[in-house]
Amino acid sequence: MSFLQMLIDAASVGGLYALTAIGIGLIFGVIGLVNFAYGEYIMVGAYVLLLSAGLYWPFAICAVLIFVVLFALASDFLVFRQVRRAPPETLMIVSFGLSFMIQHVWVVMFGSLTRTVNFLPAINHSVEIGGLRIAGVSLLQIAATVLLTTVLALFINYTRIGYQMRAVSENPRMARLVGVNSNRVIAVAFAISAVLAVTVTVLFVAQTGSMTPFFGVSLTMIGFVATVIGGMGSLPGCALGGFLVGTVTTILQMVLPPHLQPFREAFVFTSVILMLLVRPQGLIAVRSAWERV
Amino acid sequence: MSDEETPMRDLAALLWPWAVWAVLLLALTLVFSQISPAMARITTDTLIKLVIVTGLYIFVGNSGILSFGHGAFLIVAAYASAWVTIPLAMKGVILPGLPEVLRGLQLSPLGGLLTGMAVAGGLGLLAGIPLMRLSGIAASIATFAFFIVISVIYNNWTDWTKGTASLVGLPTWVGPWAALAAALVALMIAWIFQNSRAGLLLRASREDLVAAHGAGIRVMRLRLLAFVLSATVAGAGGVMLGHNNGALTTANNVYLNLSFIVIAMLVVGGIRSLSGVVVGTLALSVLAEIFRRFETGVEIGGMMLQIPGGSREVLLGLCMLLALIMRPDGLSRGRELPVPGFLRGGRAKAAKTETEALQ
C-alpha cells in the first residue's frame, strides 16, 4: 500500500514539475532561451486568481489564461525579440533581469507578504480508491500532465505550425529562407508555454491557496533542473526529467531520517550534479541543441 | 623610433589599463569616503562588490562559462573567517556547537581573510574537478546546483552557522581603504592572469573549443585553474562582506540575491573584459544608490520627488534590461582601455608592421 501511495505522490508532484519543465524546454528548444521569467508567468497568474476571487471558477481560469498568454507574448515582443541574436548567456541574464523586475513590480503592487485565496477547495477532498486515499488535486495533476503532454506532442508532430516550430528549432536561418514566419512561430511557442504555466498556477494555487511575489522562483529552478536532466530541447526528456525530480523528492521525503530532512534539497541537487556528470547531454539527447566536442 | 627591445616600456604598456582603473578608483575613494559616513559605507560596499565581480570574472570572462555557483564561495569564506576571528569570550556563548579546536582559536583579521580564501579555494578545487568536465548550459546549471547544495547546508547547519538567525560578533575591520586595497589586488590578479600564458590559452578555448582541443590545449586543466583562482578571489570578497557588516546570515536568500546582482554587474559591464568589470560594478552601484535616494525623497527645483517604496529594484531591473538590449555585449563591448601611443612600440609595433606586411 505504501509503495503505491508513494508512486501516486511521486506522479502528482512529478507531474507539476514536468509541466513546468516542458514550458521551459519548449522555449529553449525553439530559440535557445533559458527563460528564468517562466516562473513569473506562473506567479502573475496566481495574483489574477487572487483578484478574481468570487467569480465562478471557469471564468476565473479564463481570466488567468487570457492575462498570462498576453503577458508572455508581451515579454517576447518587448524584451526577447529585441535580443534575438545575442549570445545565449546574455539571453539568460536578460530573462533573469526580467524575472527580477516583474517580481518587484508585484511587490510594489501587492506587497511582499503571503496572500491567501480559497480557490476551488472542492478538489482538495480525498477520494478513496481500493484502500488508497488520494487527494483530488493529485489526480488532476496526473490527468493534466498526461492530457497536456499528449496534446502538445500531437500539435508539434502533426500540425503545420508545429512542423514550422521544429524547423525554426533545427535551423532558424534556413527556416526563414523557405518562408517560415519565425516571429509568429516563436510567439506561438510562448503562448503554449503560457498555457502550461496557467495549468501549473491553477493546480498550485488550488493545492496551497497561498502566494508571494517570489514563489515562481523555486518552481523555475526545479523546472530547469528537470529540463537539463531530461536533455535540453527534448520535450519527452523534459517530462521524464520532471517526473524523475518529483520521484527523487518524494522518496527522500520518505526515507530520510528526521534530522536530515532539512537537507533534502541538498540531496536532490547533489543528485542533479551527479546525473549531469554521468550524462551531460541529458537522458534524451538532442543533437542540434548540443555543442560539439 | 629605435627598434631596440624596451622591456620597461612593454611592462608599462601591459600594466597601463590596470593603472588607469587603479588611479580612477583611488580618486573616487578619496572623494566619496570624505563626504559623509554614509557615503563611506557605500564606497566600501561598492569596492567589496568589485572584488567579488572580479573574482567571478576570472573564471567567467576567460572560460566563457557562466557560473551561478560563486555565491557558495562567498558563504564558505565568510563563515570560515567568522569561526576563527570572533572573540573567544563571545564564541563560547554564540557557537557552543563548534569543535574544541575552533572554539579556542582566535586569529588576526588577516588570518581570517587568508583562512576564508583558503577554504573557498579548496572548495573550488574540490567542486571544480567534477564540474569542469561539463560545458555550456549544463555547466551553468551544475554550478547553480552546487550553490543550492552549499546554501542549504549552511542554512540548516545550525551548530556551526546559527542557520537563518544572525551570527554576530565579527570584528568590523573593513573600511573604504581596506576594500580599495583588496579591489586593486583583485584587479591586478585578474589582469595578470588574463595576460598570462594560461589565461590566453583559456581565452582561445572560449572562442573555439574545438580548435583549442585540436591545438592541444588542455582545456579542463586551465578551466580548473581559473575556477580555483576565481573562487579564492571571490572568497576574499565574501570575507570582507562579513567583516564590513559585523554579522552573517543565510536568511531571505541574501546570497542568492547577491549572486544575481554580481552576475548582473558583470554582464552589464561586459563579460569579456576587465574594464567591463569596473564599468559594470560602478554603473549599477551608482544607479542603485540614486534610486535609493529617490525612494526616500529628493528635492529638485523646489519639487519633492519620491518614488513608491520597492520600486528601486524595478528601475534597476529596467536599466539592466535596457543596457542589455542596447548593448548585448556589455557597456565595454568586451574591449579594454587602449594603450596610449607613447607606450606602444617595441614588440607591439613590430607585430603591427608584420601584420601590415602580411596584408
Image: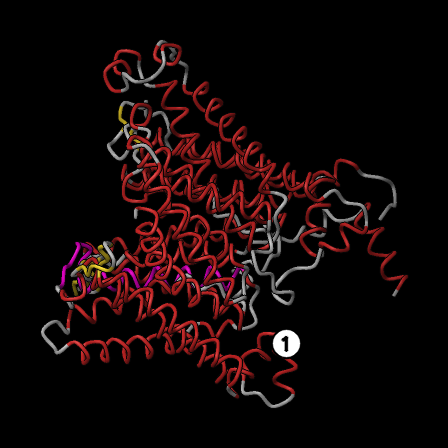
Q: Where A104 sits versus A178, above or below?
A: above
Residue B349 in percent (x, y) is at 81, 51
Q: Which residue matches tag 1?
A: A171
Q: How many marks?
A: 1
Residue A178 in percent (x, y) is at 64, 89
**Residue placed furthest toward the bottom:** A179
Q: Is residue B311 left or right of residue B64?
A: left
Q: Specify start and end residues of the magenta stretch as a single range.
A: A89-117
Taking the spot 58% from the left edge, 51% from the top edge, the residue there is B65
Taking the spot 89% from the left edge, 62% from the top edge, the residue there is B358
Taking the spot 48% from the left edge, 70% from the top edge, the residue there is A26
Residue B257 in percent (x, y) is at 36, 48
- Residue type at mark 1: give it: Asn
Residue A12 in percent (x, y) is at 32, 59
Q: Quadrant of the rendered structure where residue A143 is?
A: bottom left
Q: Who is closer to the viewer here, A192 or B218?
A: A192
